[in-house]
Image (tube, helix red, strand yellow):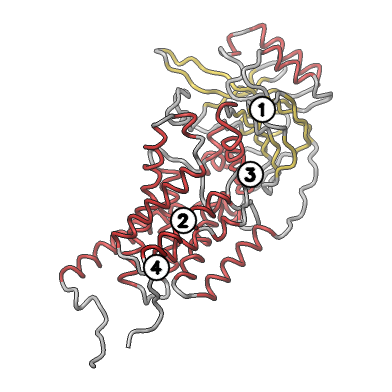
Amino acid sequence: MLEARSFFLRPMQRLLLTFLAIGLGILAFPPFHWHPLALVSPIPLMFALHDAKPAPALGLGLLYGLGLFAGTLNWLAVLLGPFAVLLFFILALFPTVFAVITANLADSLAERKWLPCAIGVLWTGIEYFRCEWFTLRFPWITPGTGLPPGYLTPWIGVYGVSLLVATAAAALAFRQMKTGLSLLAAVALAAYLPQPSTPEGDLTIAAVQGEDVPFDRLVGLSEHAGAPLDAIVWPEVSVVPDIRTKPAQLAAVRRLLAEKRAAFLTLGTVTDLGADRWANTAVTIGPDAILGTYDKNRPVHFFDDGEPGTEVPTVGTPLGRLGTTICFDNDYEAVVRQAVLNGAELFLVPSMDAAPWTARQHLQHAELARHRAAENGRWIVVASSSGLTQVIDPRGCRVAELPLFDPGVLVARVATRSGLTPYTRFGWLVGPICTALAVGLLVLTSVLARKQRVDPQKSRPALPDA
């Protein structure tokens, strides 16, 4: 007889489970930030997809994607108006593809012990492609970024955590309870067991927060930071036009550095590339010279955010080698990791989150820098236009922050760090490997589906005689 391991759900039950998954996912992210729910939010979806045929699975996947992304990223409507609806549909295509392939896999390979692992790989591969490689790549709203950085982060990063969460959810849905519960327990312990505190550093950094404030106001805020300072960082595009073409402003910065006995100031400006083209640039200014520049590698989609930079240089300073990745760069795992491979020992990040984009957007964005810090084992200081200006230690813990929207200056003690985490060396490969394997699973499901169409009787187990 057939093994009694399947269970059957009515369409309304599948629908309710999908809505439950959406609700748990929304609550896991800011502004609610009930982050433990990120650990369990995929579970109802996996149960809804269990034994679902491809056509209903398509509808469930699309519903899940639309509900999750519209529920968490509704601030996009403030930025993009009605166009945000189209963007939600584009993002929803990825869980839709996941749901259809999962249904095909389960239909053909339900008795395979490794099926939950395959589903976890499929989830992670599609997620990594959506976040890092797709034309409209957008690395927000994943299980790995919903949970706080923990012991697993410097080993396998956010995509490795997503892999474990998705595999656990699939294992539970396919009645491999020990496997599912063991994986969930391991991820929960890694995320929530207390970590040793990071010692206070020996460098004093001031991060200025201010949106659309004049140059003199930025100088004044920096002067209120107290003395001495080792370095100062201002927000993205805080000085426009290019400060390098303004001798009076350069002289004012150098007077500020002398007053504070600081080694340098990093700020956001623009570089004129000619022919109405420009680059979004971070400039690091020393007492006597420009120490280095960096052009933003990941301009924000749909905005005039400059031409993308093609290199990830670091800046040699008296304090150590500096990474000055800008704002959206830090949403992606590859840019910060490449800066660390290029020698970055500390990150001072000019950033901009416009005040009209809502507090929800600011808080969601602020979480991503925490994961980059933990993945690569570096201090990150973010100076954001209207927040969240924050200081993050190498374990991904936010040790200081300013209130949203109000101009101010944040002073904190940090340190340079050398050495590479396992993630920086090899753990980052989890995402690309899962994407490659997901393509293989897509091919496998296509082959199996074709075999079923050719000979449906041979593709199903024989029923016993009456």
Q: CA distance from mark 3 to mark 1?
A: 20 Å
Q: CA distance from mark 2 to mark 1?
A: 34 Å
Q: Label 4 is placed on what type of residue?
A: His
Mark 3 or 2 closer to N-term? 2
Q: CA distance from mark 3 to mark 4?
A: 35 Å
The answer to whether mark 4 and mark 2 are in CB contact below 8 A is: no
Q: Rate crowding at label 3 as few (under 14), some (14 to 19) or many (20 or more) other CA atoms within 10 Å.
A: many
**Is residue 272 placed above or below 416 in the rendered structure?**
above
On the image, the x and y values in percent for residue 177 come to 52, 75
On the image, the x and y values in percent for residue 446 come to 25, 61
Which of the two discs, 3 and 2, sits closer to the camera? 2
Q: Which residue is mark 3?
A: 370
Q: Which residue is mark 4?
A: 50
Q: Which residue is mark 2?
A: 19
Which of the two discs, 3 and 4, sits closer to the camera? 4
Image quadrant occupied by the N terminus:
bottom left
Q: Label 1 is placed on what type of residue?
A: Phe
Q: Helix, strand, or loop for circle 1?
A: loop
**Front one among 371 and 34:** 34
Q: Is residue 393 left or right of residue 11?
A: right
Q: CA distance from mark 3 to mark 2?
A: 29 Å
Which of the two discs, 2 and 1, sits closer to the camera? 2
The answer to whether mark 3 and mark 1 are in CB contact below 8 A is: no
Q: Helix, strand, or loop for circle 3?
A: helix
Q: Helix, strand, or loop for circle 2?
A: helix
On the image, the x and y values in percent for residue 445 come to 29, 63
